[in-house]
Structures are given as C-alpha cells and as structure tokens.
Amino acid sequence: MRLVVPKETRPGEKRVAAVPATINKLVKHGFEVFIEKSAGINSLYSDSDYESNGAKIVSDIASEIRNADVVASVGTLDLNHCQNLKNGTICISFAQAKRDKENIVAISKTKSTLLSFDFVPRISRAQSADALTSQATVSGYHTMLTAASLLPKMFPLVMTASGTIRPSKVLVIGAGAIGSHLCFYLHRMGCNIMLYDGDEIEQRNLSAQLFGFNSVQNAKVYEVRNIVEEQLGYLKPNGYKIATNYNYWDKESDIFPITFSCVDSMKVRKEIFETWKTQEDRKVFFD
C-alpha cells in the first residue's frame, strides 16, 4: 500500500503526521511511504532522517496523493487535494466537523474514507489511538509558559529580605483534558489556582488530585464555584450548564490577573472572550 504524508499548510502548524521512528515500522508492515520534501523540517526532522528509515522523499505531492491508498496529515487535506483523491483512499487527520466542513464534503464525494483523531473517544479500548490527550498535555504546558511570559509579575510566591511577592491568582474555567493539564502545570509553578467547571463532579475530582485533602484550598475552590455561579447566571439545558451573563469578569478582573477558558462550547468561549475584551484594565486571557 502507498502511504503519503504531505507537508502541513495551515499557518503556524509545525507538526508532521509521521516521524522517522514510525517509518521503519510501516515499511515492515508492507507500506511504501512517500514524504513530501521538507515535510518534517518544522518538527526538526530532515529529509535524510526519513530516507534512512525507508521513506521516499517526493517533490510532486499532488501526483502522489492521486495515487495514494492512505494519506496521513495533521490538518485536513487542502481542498484541491481532497478533490483529486482516488476512489477508496483512506485519509487520516485531525479533521474537525465545523472547521473543515467543505474539505470533508469534498472527500466524501470521491468515495474515500476519512478517519479523524478528533473524534476518538477517551475510553480504555481507544487509549492506543488517543492522540487528543497528548496534544492537550502539550497545549496546557505551552499555554502556561506563554501566560507566564506575558504577565508582568512572577507566578510563584517569592520571599526575600527586601520583600515578598505573592503568588499569582489564576482562574481556570473548564476541568477537561486541557484544563486539567493546565492546572497541574500552574500548581507546580506555585500559582493560586481558582478552578471552575460546569460539572461539579469534574471540578471535585480535579480539585482532589491537585490539593489532596487540603481542606483550606478545597474550600477556596468551592467558594469560587459559588461566586462564579451567582455572578454568571447558569442555565442547564440537556444537563450541561451554559453561561448567560459575564458581568463577573468586569467586577473581578483585578482578582484574577489571568483567565484561562477551557470550555468545550465554542459559543460560550466566544461570549466570554468578547466580554473580557471590554474591560478597561484587562490582564491576560487564554482560550
């Protein structure tokens, strides 16, 4: 079978769908692997690294995709490539239904199969294919580092003979995959974390992992929960809470210098950000 890995074209995308260490395994399983020239350069993999593991470097990626049995990419294929797939091609990527709707329709018209890691459930049987958790780990870590560089003060408690710098207060909304990893990194950096999630069980579980049986810190977490729910005003359609009023950020912006929004709902995230932008003395916001 012919497996083709094109270079990513989305601005800012530095990942590549296959690394040299996996090429050897694919070749042993009978694949002919074709890598677009310089596809791995942004991930610090040279063309020679791929060639030494059995891959073939190609310049005309369009013709290779037309003849491919499997196409692996991080983002969805470009629209012009989607339209040129042969019947029965298998496309593997992180395709997102809302963002990549036009590309997905084009792939379906060629009677090809699209497999998206974005839809792999986080269950025990699917752990070997769970790429989202690894990406959430990276996202949480990178977000924490970026926030630390933007905030005009240090994260941890610093005590010196000349004075004391109190730890930064951080509000994290959403205790899912990215939110939980973010909290762990912020906790290690010494931040004063205020955690909120619409699902009280999720919030309780993550709070216990972060603070153990520290009753004082857990009490603070639930104090924040009460404040957020009172100030935001929550509806609960179909068992999931959606924020409807964001005056909380206007009143409490000085309390939380950094706000991290890790909510699944795109509508809620957009509304939170639009309200945050109206603050005169806004600090740092990450979505």
Image (cartoon, grey):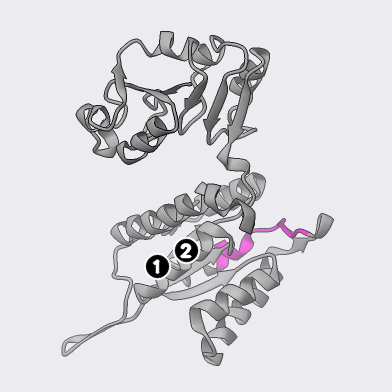
Q: Is residue 282 visible?
A: yes
- Image side of residue 84 versus residue 11, left or right: right
Tell me which residue sits at (44%, 32%) in the image: 29
Which SS class for mark 2? Answer: helix
Which residue is found at the position 55% from the left and 71% from the top? 195
Could you tell me if the residues under marks 1 and 2 are in contact, i.e. CB atoms within 8 Å?
Answer: yes
**Picture residue at 42% right of the left edge, 8% below the top:** 63
Residue 171 place in picture, x, y as percent = 51, 67
Write down the region rendered in magenta: 240-251
Q: Residues within 10 Å of mark 1 (few under 14, many from 20)?
A: some
Q: Residue furthest left?
A: 161
Q: Is residue 116 above or below residue 89?
A: below
Q: Is residue 261 visible?
A: no
Q: Quadrant of residue 191?
A: bottom left
How many residues crowd around disc 2 within 10 Å: few (fewer than 14), some, or many (20 or more)? many
Three-letter amino acid code at the position of disc 1 = Tyr
Q: Is residue 208 magenta?
A: no
Q: Is residue 79 left or right of residue 284?
A: right
In the image, residue 220 sits, relative to residue 198, either above or below, namely below
The dot on residue 231 is none
Q: Residue at x 46, y 34 (%)?
A: 74
Which label belongs to residue 185? 1
The numbered dot on residue 181 is: 2
Q: Amino acid at mark 2?
A: His
Q: Closest to the observer: 185 or 154? A: 185
